[in-house]
Amino acid sequence: MRAPRFNPLHLAGWLFADMLLVLALVAMGDQGDPLAAEAAVKPSASASAKPKRPPKAPKHTGPRAVVNKPVKVSIDAAPGDKRRIEQRLRAVTAPHKDRRAAFVLTFGHHAEPGPGGEYAHEVNSLLKKARPGMFEGATTRDFWKGGTSAGHADIEIYFYTY
């Protein structure tokens, strides 16, 4: 009698390795900023003691983390109108101009997937030109989102903690 070709026991090792990978990714993504936690715990100086100069900002050590919640913005500009797209990108990112983006997900609206993805790609290609300091080195992804209006993009920006 011949042994069966498929034995579920052979998959146990692969399942264990996959579970460890998922746990490692979850642990890395859930790291907060340890220096921010320390700053919140430190007691404030008494009202009678007046510092002579403002305290220095803490020097960051260790790896940077990514904020779990994205900043969501939207722009409206005709496809191909690069000047208007840049202008809108500068306007919607102005409140966050001192931050650095880790990665950006852009959803181009259109009735068809091809033009929607192309619009998202066009928007992402102009991010560094609109805000070089914010998007330098950021990873971008282009997506299509069904809709009837062309020239609209929803953008999710995931920033570093510092």
Image: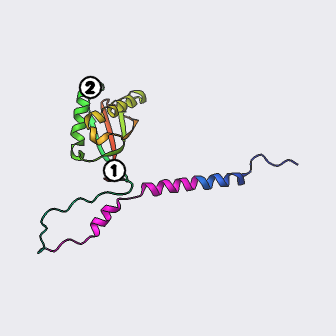
Disc 2 versus disc 1: nearer the observer:
1
**Residue 84 lies in quadrant:** top left
Q: Residue at x 38, y 30 (%)?
A: 116
Q: Principal SS element in the magenta part?
A: helix
Residue type, numbered disc 2: Asp
Question: Which residue is most to the front?
Answer: 52
Residue type, numbered disc 1: Tyr
Q: Position of residue 162 (x, y in %)?
A: 30, 53
- Neighbours of disc 1 within 10 Å: few (<14), some (14-19), many (20+): some
Q: Which residue is mark 2?
A: 81
Q: Please determine whether, in this image, residue 38 is positioned above or below residue 21.
A: below
Q: Residue at x 30, y 26 (%)?
A: 79
Q: Which residue is mark 1?
A: 160
Q: Please determine whether, in this image, residue 65 is positioned above or below residue 74.
A: below
Give SS at disc 1: loop
Rounded to the nearest whole Å, what is the CA distance between mark 2 and mark 1? 30 Å
Q: Position of residue 38 (x, y in %)?
A: 31, 66
Q: Position of residue 86 (x, y in %)?
A: 25, 32
Task: Identify the mark nearer the N-term, 2 or 1.
Answer: 2
**Residue 127: numbered disc:** none
- Neighbours of disc 2 within 10 Å: few (<14), some (14-19), many (20+): few
Q: Please determine whether, in this image, residue 59 is positioned above or below residue 104.
A: below
State the extent of the magenta-drawn residues as a range. 18-46
**Residue 112 lies in quadrant:** top left
The answer to whether mark 2 and mark 1 are in CB contact below 8 A is: no
Q: Is residue 140 left or right of residue 95?
A: right
